[in-house]
Image: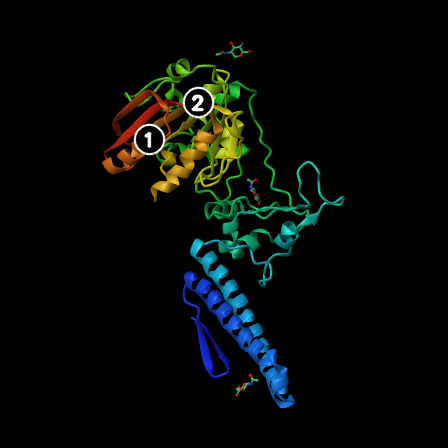
Amino acid sequence: MGSVSLKIGDGTARFKRATFCSSAVNIIMIFCVITTNLFALYAFTASPKHHNNHLLLHTQKNFSLISEQVSLILREIDSSQKKLVQMEKELLGYENVDLSRPNIASELKLYLQHHQLPLGKDSRTGITEMVASIGHSCEKSADLLSQYMNYKIAGPCPDDWSSAQKLILRGCEPLPRRRCFAKSVSKVGLYPFPISLWKPVGNKTVNWSGLGCKNFECLNGKKLGRDCIGCFDLVNGYENQRYIKARGKNDFVIDDVLALASGGIRIGLDIGGGSGSFAARMAERNVTVITNTLNIDAPFSEFIAARGLFPLFLSLDHRFPFYDNVFDLVHVSSTMDVGGKPEKLEFLMFDIDRILRAGGLFWLDNFYCANDEKKAALTRLIERFGYKKLKWVVGEKVDSVGSGKSEVLSAVLQKPVRV
Ligand SMILES: *[C@@H]1O[C@H](CO)[C@@H](O)[C@H](O)[C@H]1NC(C)=O
Ligand SMILES: *[C@@H]1O[C@H](CO)[C@@H](O)[C@H](O)[C@H]1NC(C)=O
Ligand SMILES: *[C@@H]1O[C@H](CO)[C@@H](O)[C@H](O)[C@H]1NC(C)=O
Ligand SMILES: *[C@@H]1O[C@H](CO)[C@@H](O)[C@H](O)[C@H]1NC(C)=O
């Protein structure tokens, strides 16, 4: 790390920049040095009668020397502070998109440009400029982002939905808007609602480019994670039995859960909702459910939309784009297993709590607990929220993905009124 040394008179003051703390010490020391020198200067200039011109010249020379040194120090402090901010950013992994770097797409620059409001400050919102936002982690994938923003304006967008999803999964969320036309799909053979809820979706409603499978028959034979085992098959298998027929004590039936609710369940959010069957069963009960999903290995969003349901293309790391206390119900399955530090799950839980109304239901559906420790941590976390346990079942679930049995928790919890 750098250091600043300062020669004033015979003394040499040395400033080392090593830690965040020492910069405060530096500033105090510099202050001391400056004050001491000013006192010395005062002592010399206080009784000019006893000094000749030669001395005065000397003092002036020394004074300009000091001010030169001081400005040098100030410059050094300034640059140190900038370096500290940079270090802090690196520690946090936080970085603004550096638009000055070479190869940055001009469309990205244009998109991120601030626009002053033509009439100055808006009196209602208090803002003076429009600022387009993208995820702060976009910087970490700047090359991919630049590639994503490289297209012909008003031309067809490149076939790159999977790069877009890759960016989102790396925390580049929200993505910038683009000025190109997304490839449209003719969507022939859509059924009217509510027939659409359980009709097989035609292969042609999806652009399969970038996916391993090229039709739904192929997907039916795939295990696409814990919450989607044959979940695209609405005719055979278990998918059309889910939520109306229990396979074990951990499976709750929708009508039982709805009967627990006070004040009616009208709108809900399903987190990690697979192919949308939860929302479909709820739609049959006149409850509107939004299904949160990405297109990992399969066209979940298109499939859900083709069923006449609402797909929300958003990663779990994103704050839910809903206002406080709006949902009557939040349904969560294993997908909430965000892994890593317990704080990660806490941020998610608090956000779920935020959007759920008092008296609303939080349905934890076959939540997978890797071990006893994890189960205890989850239980502690849930209990901290003070929800009323309307249902609470810990059991073993025969896991068709991977090997053998795993412990799962299913619960229906009611959000209390907090003051
Ligand atoms: C000016 O500084 C020199 C050494 O750099 C010192 O010898 C001299 O006494 C100083 N003069 C005054 C007036 O401070
Ligand atoms: C899928 O989209 C890409 C471009 O986004 C296009 O080149 C391709 O023809 C489309 N495929 C189908 C089957 O429409
Ligand atoms: C989708 O394509 C597969 C394979 O070509 C075909 O067997 C199946 O009938 C198609 N499904 C629908 C719903 O069109
Ligand atoms: C849903 O709403 C429709 C229209 O209001 C009504 O006819 C139907 O009985 C409702 N279904 C349920 C399960 O409440």
- Residue at point 65%, 89% (across, down): 53
Horizontal side, residue 117 vs residue 176: left or right = right
Provide residue 189's location: percent of width, then percent of height: 56, 26
- Ligand 2: image quarter: top right
Q: Secondary structure at mark 2?
A: loop
Closer to the observer: label 1 or label 2? 2
- Residue at point 63%, 86% (across, down): 57
Q: Nearer the viewer, residue 233 or 101?
A: 101
Colouring used for the render = rainbow
Q: Around disc 1, counting alpha carbons within 10 Å, would you say few (fewer than 14), some (14 to 19), or many (20 or more)?
A: many
Provide residue 222's location: percent of width, then percent of height: 37, 35
Q: Indicate yes or no: mark 1 CB to ligand 4 under 8 Å.
A: no
Q: Nearer the viewer, residue 394 or 25?
A: 25
Q: Amino acid at mark 1?
A: Phe
**From mark 1 to mark 2, how far is it between C-alphas?**
25 Å
Q: Nearer the viewer, residue 324 or 11?
A: 11
Q: Amino acid at mark 2?
A: Val
Residue 367, labelled with which disc?
Answer: 1
Residue at the far right: name it. Answer: 119
Residue 417, labelled with which disc?
Answer: 2
**Relative vertical location of residue 408 with respect to residue 90 in this rendering, above or below:** above
Quadrant of the rendering where the N terminus is positioned? bottom left
Label located before the other in sequence (1 or 2):
1
- Residue at point 48%, 53% (across, down): 94
**Relative vertical location of residue 410 with respect to residue 344 in this rendering, above or below:** above
Quadrant of the rendering where the C terminus is positioned? top left
Q: Nearer the viewer, residue 68 or 157?
A: 68
Residue 101, labelled with which disc?
Answer: none
Q: Indicate yes or no: mark 2 CB to ligand 4 under 8 Å.
A: no
